[in-house]
Amino acid sequence: MKFILNLIIILIILLKTGNVLSDEVIFNVNNIELNKEFSKNKEKLANEAFKKGFEKLTNRLLLEKDYKKIANTRLNEIKNLISYYQIAINNEDKIIVNISFDKNNIHEFFFKKDILYSDILNSEVILFPLLIEGNQQFIYSKNYFLNSWKNDNSEETIKYTLPLESIENIEIIEKYKNDIFKLPTTEFFKEYNMENKVFAIIEKNNNQAKIFLNTEISNKKLKKNIIIKNSFSNKKDFDNKIISDIKKVVKELIKSQNLIDVRTPSFLNFKIKLKNKNNLIILSNRLKEINLVSNFYVQQLNKDYALIKIKYFGQISKIIKKLEDKKMNLKKTSSGWLLNII
């Protein structure tokens, strides 16, 4: 009797919270700064915030070609994508607005436009920039790009890490000195367990910079060449332009390997053991925090375990990683997928 009562309570809670999951992060755009002149008219303020928020959101989610495709989206269409907004700060210095976009409406919008989007929030990249000027290579000392990357915090969606100075890495660069473009990123970054690795070779003179990116993005080897002309009178401005352009290309590469097609959702069935009577509620709450998961269904429930089906977007490897981030371990067994709450 007690078991049945517990099941009823759990099911009531799940039904009340709903099995259509909401996203808390990826479709939120915060810290939209507006001109003080908009404070005089609330409608103008909201409209300007909506346009800026939509621009920031799509710039973050979409490949450049798709971002340009919807750059002229009408205001009325943007308004239909918004769940709510709030004025976080409104004083004599500035106005800051936060906006939450509705995930289902955004999905429908992308579906109609035939656009794939990418979830790269909180992506991490291990990067090393090797500077070549003339016939000389600058590894750690006198390498402007290495020092500037350490101090640059302008990137919001991607966190860059630079490897610590080591004799081993100096030896690897020396080993491939005469054929630096063949330097293996796996060997160079072997001490860093990260799925995004970038070895940037920057050949620079007064007129231009030739950049070769030797990368592993989502564990896939990708190479990219960039040429940047020097149109600056100031050396520092040119160097900062190089950093900015490299970041744009790296972001585009990461997006390209993490595309989500809302037209083709996938389904995953797994078993969760009910050692703790609150496991289903914990599962529900944590799934709500994963934007790739759209719905979940309780297919079977007894005193020992529950069979769950989730509807999700993207690759199975990404779902497993997202579950791990939320302290849920999903593994394949001889009888199917098993999920454990950690």
Image (spheres, helix red, strand yellow):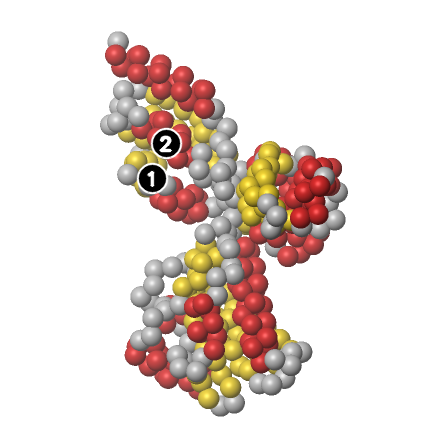
- Image coordinates of residue 202 in percent, x first then y, are 52, 78
Check disc 1: other Cα within 10 Å, few if <14, some if 14-19, many if 20+: some
Between residues 82 and 281, which one lies in front from this camera angle? 82
Q: Residue at x 67, y 39 (%)?
A: 46
Please state which of residues 145 and 261 is positioned toward the viewer in this rendering.
145
| Residue identified by numbered label 1 | 328
Looking at the rendered structure, which numbered label has been put on residue 283? 2
Residue 62 visible in the picture? no
Disc 2 crowd rating (10 Å Cα; few below 14, some 14-19, many 20+) is some
**Dot 1: element:** strand
Residue in view at x 59 percent, y 43 percent:
90
Give above or below for 178 relative to 268.
below
Q: Mark 1 is on which residue type? A: Met
Image quarter of residue 255: bottom right
Of the image marks 2 and 1, the number of the one nearer the N terminus: 2
- Seen at 49% across and 31% down, the residue is 21
Q: Position of residue 67 (x, y in %)?
A: 66, 52
Of residues 224 and 142, the one drawn nearer to the viewer in this rendering? 142
Asked whether the beta carbons under mark 2 and mark 1 sit within 8 Å of each other, the answer is yes
**In-front residue for pair 126/98:** 98
